[in-house]
Image (spheres, helix red, strand yellow):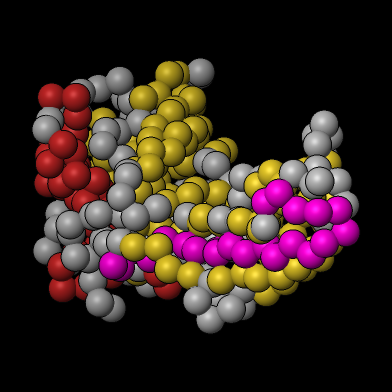
């Protein structure tokens, strides 16, 4: 496993203990380091064969389980800005676990790959905030941050990692030096390479009945060189909205070429707006270009 050498040296207790100090007191660089530590805790457990807790912790682990893990169905990540995603979850714990103790922390994460050999993971700048609902359960909220400019070489986003990521949770009691990592049954989300789409209909204005040439380009984020490149071989709809209407109608479907470029024609009949619309894939979100108005004389 590519990360084994790095994460095997990370102690879960050491990595998470920094969160006893509120993250608000840390500079941005510190917060980034915290996220990296959190992610590596999960990867460390995978490397050692300890990850995969589903229903209950193993003997000697912290008596805590996660459930009702809720996160956005899809997360768009571009080439520059960090994306913060809210997460909620339920924490169930043994009667002997004090979740209000200063040394207790619970943290939501997401990871890519299998639970046995994940190849990336992402956490937040701070642990989750939990409110007790019974003596042994709590409703919790947290945030997961995805950074396309991540500087940790082991945790950088790679284009091949676009698609399905899985929910996970880490709980730690610093005083007892017990922890548990849960990676099974906590749902999924799509982490997608952000997309852009342009359109231009010409000539403008145009005589009624004449042919318009409609061009555009479908692009998506490249997480490795931090640029947008054409998304090739994708089906894209040419749509039209009559002036005064709020509804677009599909005229035809075209495919992007080897550079992501789009080109087709349409007959001008009435004033209105032309746009391209892409339905999206598991790795790339749906996107529609802003309509280009054409005045028909």
- Give the residue displayed 34% in from the left and 63% down from the top: 227
Please state if 131 lies on the left or on the right of 33 as rendered.
Answer: right
Please state if 271 lies on the left or on the right of 274 as rendered.
Answer: right
Name the quarter where the N terminus is drawn: bottom left
Q: Quadrant of residue 178?
A: top left
Depth check, front residue: 135 or 74: 74
Image position of 256 with respect to 205: above or below: below
Please state if 205 lies on the left or on the right of 65 as rendered.
Answer: right
- Give the residue displayed 67% in from the left and 51% down from the top: 204
Q: Residue 73, position in %: x, y?
A: 59, 47
- Give the residue displayed 75% in from the left and 53% down from the top: 206
Q: Residue 72, position in %: x, y?
A: 55, 42
| Magenta-tinted stretch | 204-225
Residue 184 visible somewhere in the drawing: no
Residue at the limit of the structure toward the bottom, as seen here: 258
Q: Residue 5, position in %: x, y?
A: 16, 73
- Asked if residue 215 is among those painted magenta in the image, a careful observer would answer yes
Residue 150 visible somewhere in the drawing: yes
Image position of 82 with respect to 23: above or below: below
Q: Quadrant of residue 143?
A: top left
- Asked if residue 32 is among those painted magenta in the image, a careful observer would answer no
């Amino acid at each position: 496993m590519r990360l084994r050498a790095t994460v095997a040296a990370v102690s879960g207790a050491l990595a998470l203990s920094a969160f006893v100090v509120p993250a608000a007191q840390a500079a941005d660089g510190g917060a980034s380091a915290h996220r990296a530590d959190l992610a590596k805790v999960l990867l460390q457990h995978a490397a050692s064969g300890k990850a995969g807790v589903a229903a209950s912790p193993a003997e000697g682990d912290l008596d805590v389980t996660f459930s009702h893990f809720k996160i956005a169905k899809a997360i768009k990540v571009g080439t520059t800005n960090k994306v913060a995603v809210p997460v909620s979850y339920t924490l169930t714990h043994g009667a002997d676990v004090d979740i209000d103790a200063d040394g207790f922390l619970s943290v939501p994460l997401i990871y890519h790959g299998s639970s046995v050999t994940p190849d990336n993971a992402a956490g937040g700048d701070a642990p989750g905030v939990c409110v007790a609902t019974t003596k042994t359960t709590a409703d919790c909220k947290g945030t997961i941050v995805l950074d396309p400019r991540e500087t940790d070489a082991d945790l950088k986003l790679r284009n091949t990692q676009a698609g399905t990521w899985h929910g996970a949770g880490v709980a730690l009691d610093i005083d007892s030096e017990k922890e548990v990592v849960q990676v099974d049954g906590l749902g999924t989300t799509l982490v997608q390479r952000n997309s852009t789409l342009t359109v231009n209909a010409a000539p403008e204005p145009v005589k009624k009945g004449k042919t318009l040439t409609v061009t555009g380009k479908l692009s998506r984020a490249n997480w490795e060189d931090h640029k947008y490149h054409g998304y090739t071989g994708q089906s894209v709809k040419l749509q039209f909205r009559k002036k005064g209407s709020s509804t677009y109608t599909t005229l035809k479907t075209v495919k992007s070429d080897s550079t992501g470029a789009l080109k087709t024609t349409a007959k001008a009949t009435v004033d209105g707006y032309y746009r391209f619309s892409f339905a999206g894939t598991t790795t790339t979100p749906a996107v529609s270009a802003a309509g280009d108005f054409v005045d028909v004389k």
